[in-house]
Image: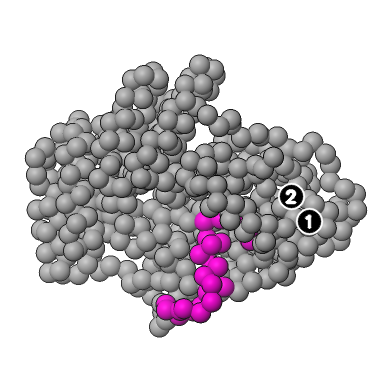
Amino acid sequence: MPSGPDLRATGTSLPPEFLGSLQAMCAPEDLSLDAASLQVYGYDNSRRSVPAQAVVFARSATQVAALVNLCRQFRVPLVARGRGTNTTGATVPVQGGVVLAFERMNRIIEVNPDDRLAVVEPGVLNGTLQTALRPFGLMWAPDPTSAPFASIGGNLACNAGGPRAVKYGSCRDNVLAVQAVDGRGRVLRLGTRTTKGSTGYDLMRVLIGSEGTLALITEATLKLVPLPAGRALLRAVYDDVESAAKAVARLMCAPLVPAALEFMDAQAIRLARDVGGAELEDAGALLMIEVDGEGEALAGAVATLGALARGPGLKSLDEARSPEQIEALWRARRALSPALRTLAPKKINEDVVVPVSRLPELVRQAEAWALESGFPIVCFGHAGNGNLHVNLLIDPDQPEQAARAAVVLDALFRKVIALGGTLSGEHGIGLDKRDFLPLAFDADTLAVMYEMKDWLDPSGILNPAKVLPLRS
């Protein structure tokens, strides 16, 4: 079993020559060296913390390029940070160095409704962008649960998705172009403002999801889609996981793709009711099936997907049509992740993906691991993509629970790969899954990834010790 990530800074101070150059480069308000800031910007939603040695607040791509060149000259690690909402430790500066915060690069540069695109800086919040697009009747499709306080740059760094990804795709499917600074300090412009393009290598898609280890995105041109005229939400409750999974298979084989298709296991249903306030009965599994469209087409879609949801094991099928009813159900779904902390002090949240047909096997295995380990394991997620959030709920003050959790995680990742799946659907790799990457890729494929890292970041300064296993 891979050992856990080493959470320690280098313990050395920044070279005086570097610090002097850094202070000369940055306006006083754009550089923080005080202990409180170093602590705050060394922490993220993984609940890990390693203090930074300096925090720089980015203002422009030119400044970012100059900082990369300075860090490269002195071999100082440089870790990009949005709002720290990631759960994998991807923005924790485990080798010290500079944290580059993008929160002040937060301009919406352009909204072009004719071409259905927006140009934004990486510090723009997902929720802020959606609000700005609404008067144009447009939206950017990726909708992670953290959208109100997660940045677009952070979304791109981990290729975020959310419930709508089943119909509209994840970040890679909704970005037209990026500007980025690589580890050599070069400002790259990748992609195009058009929705079609077959010119050169598609390096843009390589950068999206690379968690700041290859280049730092300083601008993004986003593909927009029309806001749906109407929405409806079906809630299908089943006796067991198998019945729900068979319904998912039927739904995903239909020509009509739902806008969202969410799954909850029995424990998640109880949490959605007891903590989230949803009016739900105890059951083995639940599906939330959202449909969007217009008028008669929407009504027809509801009827079609409702018929497909029916089958052996169905306990009830209800429709929410009013915005208030729909929002109440989604509010309960969004409350699930924070509600898990009511069951245990620590939540280990993995976002594995398996083929839709293998979801029942994975959920049943998670139930077995919960019985064997003695701590709760709660499953919910984006069933239409086979993206399951497997949540291990432990008390970190009990060493035996932490040890059992490590064994379960190892077994989980091996099981997912054996089922034809992958380690992460939208949270990324960061520190959490770094040492499990050899399960997902053979040696030759990993070698190419190391070569790409060396090509774009030859000094190894960009977010070191993340994504790829450490080399000896």
The secondary structure type at the circle numbered 1 is: helix
Above or below for 185 versus 262:
below
Q: Nearer the viewer, residue 307 or 252?
A: 252
State the predominant SS element of the stretch in magenta.
Answer: loop
- Residue 244 location, quadrant: top left
Give coordinates of residue 122: x percent, y percent: 57, 63
Residue located beneath label 2 in the image: 77
| Pointer 1 local density, CA inside 10 Å: few below 14, some 14–19, many at least 20 | many
Above or below for 43 versus 111:
above
Magenta residues span 190-216
Residue located beneath label 1 in the image: 71
CA distance for labels 2 and 1: 7 Å
Decide whether residue 51 is among the magenta residues. no
Quadrant containing the C terminus is top right
Residue 321 visible in the picture: no
In this picture, residue 296 sits left or right of residue 458: left
In this picture, residue 286 sits left or right of residue 315: right
Above or below for 141 versus 386:
below
Q: Nearer the viewer, residue 124 or 277?
A: 124
Residue located 62% across and 59% down the image: 452
Residue located 21% across and 48% down the image: 248
